[in-house]
Amino acid sequence: QVQLVESGGGLVQAGGSLRLSCAASGNIFGINDMGWYRQPPGKQRELVATITSIGSTNYADSVKGRFTISRDNAKNTVFLQMSSLKPEDTAVYYCNADVTVWGRNPYDYWGQGTQVTVSS
């Protein structure tokens, strides 16, 4: 009933920038927290950043000062602006959203993931 579709991943040199987008669609009544997670090669999925419906943000220490999360509530979209990228930022990036569907309790949805590769 709800789909999260990510875009914006790719290959970039160290020091470069990328902007990820994630749009939620479906029978949506409302969206609470939205966020980005990543899974580096051979490692577990980890938090990158989250944002509440009123714009309060939280970041992993490893990306503070380099990444900025934002959202457009009218378009059910969350963004991740990534700057000063490092090779260790290489990972599959996943969008996450706590979505309330009409007539149901909130549920956690995930996107399919988008690859970000930072070359040294």
Image (tube, rainbow, N blue to C red):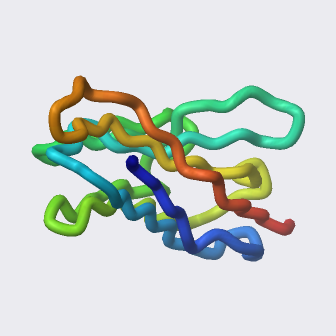
Q: Residue at x 23, y 36 (%)?
A: 100
Percent from the top left, x then y, of residue 88?
76, 48
* Foreground pick, 90 / 28: 28
Point out residue 6 in the picture as x, y percentages from the top left corner: 53, 63
Of 86 and 45, nearer the camera is: 45
Which residue sits at x=88%, y=34%? 42
Question: Residue 60: where, in percent of width, then height?
Answer: 49, 34
Task: Out of 36 and 15, give the one closest to the viewer.
Answer: 36
Q: Residue at x 50, y 34 (%)?
A: 61
Residue 63 vs residue 29: left or right? right
Question: Residue 117's x, y, as percent?
Answer: 78, 64
The image shows residue 40, relative to residue 4, as above or below, that is above
**Is 94 left or right of 21, judged from the image as shown?**
right
**7 lies above or below 26:** below
Residue at image point 77% right, 65% down: 118
Specify the quadrant of the image occupied by residue 71.
bottom left
- The quadrant where residue 11 appears: bottom right
**Image label count:** 0
Quarter of the picture containing the C terminus is bottom right
**Nearer to us in this view, 52 or 66:** 52
Q: Is residue 6 left or right of residue 27?
A: right
